[in-house]
Image: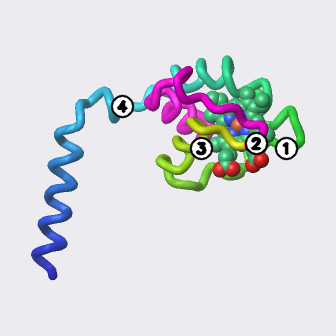
């Protein structure tokens, strides 16, 4: 059991090491740019929503979910939140999510 855990941990480490650096590097400035252009109209420039149904990012509302869950949600859209699949790349969406998470 113990050796299995070690093996899994090791291979995860190798996996992370084999991902190109650019895929892991977060770009907050790009996140901000995309956010201001595509999200701020409803979620607000400072994360205070401009429409009632939208969650507040200042209070981290809905942002405490795993990256992959939020990534998929932004890709597919949810009710009045439009789908961004095709118009934003995955790493752009991840940058936006990280930008939103550090708003206060
Ligand atoms: C037209 C208005 C609008 C725009 C533009 C918009 N959103 Fe939303 N967003 C909403 C609304 C409304 C909700 C609440 C949806 C619900 O739960 O019914 C929401 C919900 C969300 C959520 C929470 C999803 C969940 O798990 O419940 C995230 C994350 C999110 N938006 C991110 C974004 C990002 C990132 C962008 C820009 C790339 C964006 N939104 C652009 C209106 C918008």
Q: Nearer the viewer, residue 38 or 99?
A: 38
Locate residue 58, reporting x and y percent: 73, 43
Range of magenta residues: 79-104
Mark 4 C-beta closer than 8 Å to ligand 1: no
- Disc 2 crowd rating (10 Å Cα; few below 14, some 14-19, many 20+) is few
In this orientation, which residue lies closer to the viewer: 5 or 74? 74
Q: In the figure, 20 relative to 12: above or below?
A: above
Q: Work out whether 61 lies above or below 86.
A: below
Give neighbour class at mark 4: few <14, some 14-19, many 20+ (Cα, 10 Å). few
- Closer to the chain start, of discs 3 and 4, is 4
Please tell me how crowded label 1 is: few (under 14), some (14-19), or many (20+) other residues with Cα within 10 Å.
few
The residues tagged by marks 3 and 4 sit, at their Cα atoms, a distance apart of 21 Å
* Horizontal side, residue 66 vs residue 39: left or right: left
In the rendered image, the quadrant that contains the C terminus is top right
Q: Residue at x 76, y 42 (%)?
A: 79
Q: Which residue is mark 1?
A: 53
Residue 31 within the magenta-colored segment of the rendering: no
Tags 1 and 2 touching, CB below 8 Å: yes
Quadrant of the picture in which ligand 1 is shown: top right
Does the closest atom of ligand 1 sit within 8 Å of the Cβ of label 1? yes
Viewer-side label of 4, 1: 1
Q: CA gap, disc 1 to disc 3?
A: 16 Å
Instruction: Find the distance from the CA under tag 4 to the CA under tag 2.
Output: 31 Å
For the residue with label 3, is its CB less than 8 Å from the closest atom of ligand 1?
yes
* Residue at the image position 20 percent from the left and 47 percent from the top: 15
């Amino acid at each position: 059991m113990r050796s299995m855990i070690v093996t899994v941990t090791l291979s995860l480490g190798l996996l992370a090491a084999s991902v190109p650096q650019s895929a892991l590097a977060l770009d907050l400035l790009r996140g901000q740019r995309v956010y201001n252009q595509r999200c701020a109209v409803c979620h607000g420039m400072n994360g205070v929503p401009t429409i009632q149904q939208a969650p507040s990012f200042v209070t981290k509302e809905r942002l405490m979910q795993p990256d992959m869950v939020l990534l998929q949600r932004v890709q597919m859209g949810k009710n009045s939140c439009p789908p961004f699949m095709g118009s934003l790349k995955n790493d752009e969406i991840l940058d936006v999510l990280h930008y939103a998470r550090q708003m206060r």
